[in-house]
Amino acid sequence: MKNQNEIHNDYQSFPASNEKVLDQDFLNQVKAVQAVLDLNLRSNPQLFMNSANFSNSIPIAKIMYCYLLSFTYEFNDPRELTLSDVLIRSDEYNPAIRAYFKKNIDQLIFEELNSLVIDKSISKEVIKTIVEEECSSFEWITPDSVVSLALQILKIKDGETVVDVGSGAGNFLLKGAAANPRAKFTGLEINTGMYLVSLMRNYVHNGNISDGNIKILQTDAFDIVDSEANNRFDKVFANYPIGMQLKFSGVGQRYLKKISESTSHFRSTNSGDWVFNRLIRDLTVNSPKGKAIGIMAGGSSWNKTDKAERRYFLARGVVECVIALPAKLFNDTGIPVMMIVFSFGNKNVRMIDATQFFQLGRRQNFMNPQQVDQLVKALNKDSDYSRLVAYEEMEKQDYV
């Protein structure tokens, strides 16, 4: 297993993160290729029509272009690559990619894109950087610094199974798998656009590796835990949709019904955050050393509506730590956000106030590696911002 410094090095090796400064010449190459891609997009408006059922259609189209370009590096002469080759190889990788690619790319567009590599000698690192920059614009992306903190808390070991519930564009998956090559990672994503993006992004970085340590499934994560198969994992990460009202979403209805029937205090008005928290806890229930992390709304940790759920979790000794994260880390929300850590056999909760642990960014704030390290150390040490609270004290404080 890699140590904490190595994990930082691995996640920073991905281009275009807030914490990394890229060489200006390299950035100029990236901008030049992006300009050509923008021109191709304007010349081929059908790409937007075909992607109309997806939000973020422009970034998805650019990532699709980069996915196509990545195939050329498998040939000594890029001119040898044909559209038929791309479709065949895509089908071998994942049939869903082939279907989407066939719908969006015709022979003329393919030839225009393929000429980019021949004429411009685009390096693979440029393509990777463009993919990362486009992914950073998605609402559902988990920030790099949050991924780094989660990886250090989870302490993933060789041979362990790890699942990312609501894996989105694959930020946790790719960085986690790079840092832990001997662990097995599974991503569960229900949104078609994000599912395709994560598949293409994985291919750009890793190619079609049959024995790779990443598997991505398009599914309702609640169906996984509800199935008869023994779908349980050692470690779980979930940056789930904050504040979702599952009753009206069409997601996890069987699981929601099961909770309602088996738990007298549960109401359909309960925050979806705590339903997702039940899910990620259930996914580790067969692993004695299992650990799970959820990203939840801060209000769910103190509001009256969810008081009974907080009592339910504390009574079972599964809440290990709650971290109040800094504001404006995430693209999709400005509300206070918590990282909650679940494990088994706890009698105390580590409460950490990390709201001041951030650097100001251009669009979003971020935590630098030193701040992440400081928070990891706070897991085992009392300070002005970290305190170990007994479950009995939580009960006296009305589970707030």
Image (spheres, rainbow, N blue to C red):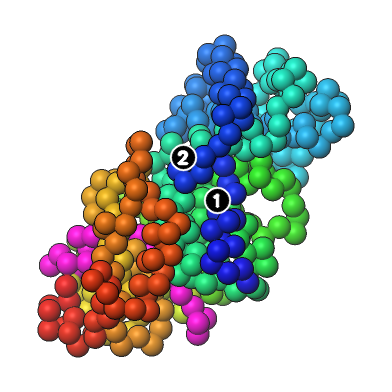
Image mark for residue 231: none
Q: Determine the residue positioned at 24% across, 85% down.
A: 390
Identify the residue shown where x is 52% and y is 72%.
155
Nearer-the-camera pick, 259 or 233: 233
Type of the residue with mark 1: Gln
Quadrant hosting residue 137:
top left
Give the spatial CA distance, label 1 vs label 2.
14 Å
Q: Nearer the viewer, residue 121 or 301?
A: 121
Residue pointed to by mark 2: 136
What residue type is disc 2 on? Answer: Ser
Q: Secondary structure at mark 2?
A: loop
Q: Which residue is mark 1?
A: 12
Q: Secondary structure at mark 1?
A: helix
In the rendered image, residue 297 lying in the magenta stretch gets the answer: yes
Marks 1 and 2, the one that precedes in the sequence: 1
- The range drawn in magenta is 287-306
Residue 67: % across, % down: 65, 34
